[in-house]
Image (spheres, rainbow, N blue to C red):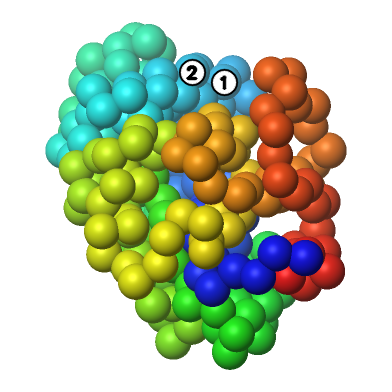
Amino acid sequence: MKEYKALFFDFDDTLFDFKKSEKIALDAAFERYDIPVNEAMYRTYDACNQAYWRGFEKGIYKSEKDSAIRFVHFCKAIGRNDIDGIEMCEYYIDVLSTTAFEIENSVALLEKLSKRYDIYIITNALARVNDARSKIGGILPFVKDRFISERIGISKPQKGFFDYCFAHIPYTKEETLLIGDSLISDIRGGIDYGMDTCWFNRFHKENPEHLPVTYEITALAQLEEIL
């Protein structure tokens, strides 16, 4: 088994359940602005949100200010021109920053692994949100550093993101394992950079592009079997 010295962990939907936090924040924003809380509204927002994050991964959007575009587009899509999308986004971010629901005892796992490896967080996220949720989630004592796309100015899976990470740690890509849930931003990014990758596939999804992942797990506890 290969010996690693450092572990790169994605944050959302790898260590913490983003979808759960997102729903709480979205429901609060819908209620505040008198928007029906139903599946149709969720689907409309999701389309606007996915478009935003695709642009984020491509480097089109980089800052917290840019994130408001998804709410501006959402309000336009539902015909609510009376709502200030920028204000709505700010409220959503405020609520989102107050919750962090760990996945499968992820914090205890990080504590255990931190005794053997240097652990780093790599995430496409707004810095203010990740700062707050990392603190609430209790991971900071076990993490050497966090590399946040908004702070770096480059997002996963772009090469420049990983260039920045490795310029700020004392390890090579051969000594580092990347663990994440996203086949695009995490796994493809790591593979293209020449890293070993571990796909956390807890929902048993297909790998449509047959990306050559080094390891695949369906539960975080399985990571210890690899390491």
Residue 213 in the image, given as x and y percentages of width and height: 70, 39
Can residue 78 be seen from the camera position used here? yes
Position above or below: 137 against 47 = below
Position above or below: 8 against 137 = above
Q: Which residue position is annotated with label 2?
A: 47
Tell me the quadrant of the picture where the C terminus can be found: bottom right
Residue 138 in the image, given as x and y percentages of width and height: 49, 80
Q: Of helix, strand and loop, which one carries label 2?
A: helix
The answer to whether marks 2 and 1 mark residues whose Cβ atoms lie closer than 8 Å is: yes
Q: CA distance from mark 2 to mark 1?
A: 6 Å
Amino acid type at circle 2 is Ala
Residue 10 in the image, given as x and y percentages of width and height: 51, 54
Residue 222 placement: quadrant: bottom right
How packed is label 2: few (under 14 Cα within 10 Å), some, or many (20 or more)?
few
Circle 2 or circle 1, nearest the eye: 2
Residues 209 and 92: in front is 209
Give the number of the disc on residue 12. Answer: none
Amino acid type at circle 1 is Arg
Residues 73 and 63: in front is 63
Q: How many marks?
A: 2
Can residue 36 be seen from the camera position used here? no
Q: Which residue position is annotated with label 1?
A: 43
> Could you tell whether 34 is left or right of 24 in the image?
left
Residues 174 and 214: in front is 174
> Could you tell whether 85 is left or right of 27 in the image?
left
How packed is label 1: few (under 14 Cα within 10 Å), some, or many (20 or more)?
few
Residue in the picture at 44% in, 87% down? 141
Residue 40 placement: quadrant: top right
Position above or below: 156 against 1 = above
